Amino acid sequence: MDKKSLRIVYMGTPEFAVASLEALVEGGYNVVGVVTMPDKAVGRHGSVLQASPVKQYAVAHGLKVMQPERLKDPCFLEELKELKADLQIVVAFRMLPEVVWSMPPMGTFNAHASLLPKYRGAAPINWAIIRGERETGMTTFMLKHEIDTGDIIEQVHVPIFENDNAGTLHDRLMTLSASLVTETVDKIIEGTLTTRPQSNEEATDAPKIFRETCRIDWNRSSCEVYNFIRGLSPYPGAWTILGDKVLKVFETEICEGNGEAPGTVFSDGKKMLVFTANDGALSIKTLQMEGKKRMNVEEFLRGTKI
């Protein structure tokens, strides 16, 4: 079997998943179907349906697209079975039921944006930065019942730089995921694939991030707050309250405090806006006030009195 005869079904939704699909298509691999989320209602009244980035790419390249509301829907399962896939690949999708991941004879593998067993869960990129990690990576692994626990196939290590945020790290990992996915498929084709089990004792979680998760706790150290803000930048954005409005903070620098209580705000009214943390302070560089556009601190202070 070669890459033109190996029948692949690809599953993914966001921009992160497009890079790997593109690598497979441009590399001449035989992608017989793409599974992605249903179109999302957007606009003031939800009257406009927006296709996922993966669907947009798939449609543009003439690939068969499936968008099941429920992954156990009998009609979807029959349609999937008819594709006679040898292998399924999952990148940034949703948890699959066993009836789906066990369907192809060569199994289903996932590409996950962490060095498993670290950061199992929905938001590995964000949590690796928030918790001050100096390194992360990409892992391909075979799916099994418990989420992100399957046997590891391949891993690639990536440094996390001090000025990285979730956006810059996302883009580096997205590029690396594409080559890791094709390398994993090549090993399956060549029959050289080996796996190793994960250690549950070394596992850490990367749970889904909600709005309240993103609120800044100024009682933490300045380093912890700095990591928290960049781990949520540019999306969904860490936030705090200034006056009576929500202020999203995207970029900061650690600086000396003035001895005031955590959460105290001081400014020169021109170029400096500083929040006190537990052991120092953070100078805000890029921010967005509720109801306003994102801007740098100088723009903000020209129109706002602190």
Image (cartoon, rainbow, N blue to C red):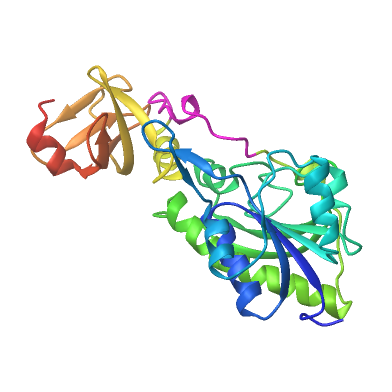
174 left or right of 303 in image: right
Q: Quadrant of residue 26?
A: bottom right
Q: Quadrant of the N terminus?
A: bottom right
Q: Quadrant of the C terminus?
A: top left
Which of 140/82 is in front?
Answer: 82
On screen, 158 above or below 239? below
**Horizontal arrangement in the rendering, residue 247 relative to residue 66 (left or right):** left
**Residue, x 89% and y 77% (percent of image)?**
191
Residue at the spot 22% in from the left edge and 34% down from the top edge: 292
Residue 185 percent location from the top left of the image: 76, 72
Q: Position of residue 231 (x, y in %)?
A: 46, 44
Q: Quadrant of residue 237?
A: top left
Q: Is 218 part of what is drawn in magenta?
A: yes
Q: Is residue 269 visible?
A: no
Relative to 230, is 157 above or below?
below
Near-viewer residue (100 or 20): 100
Residue 38 visible from this viewpoint: yes
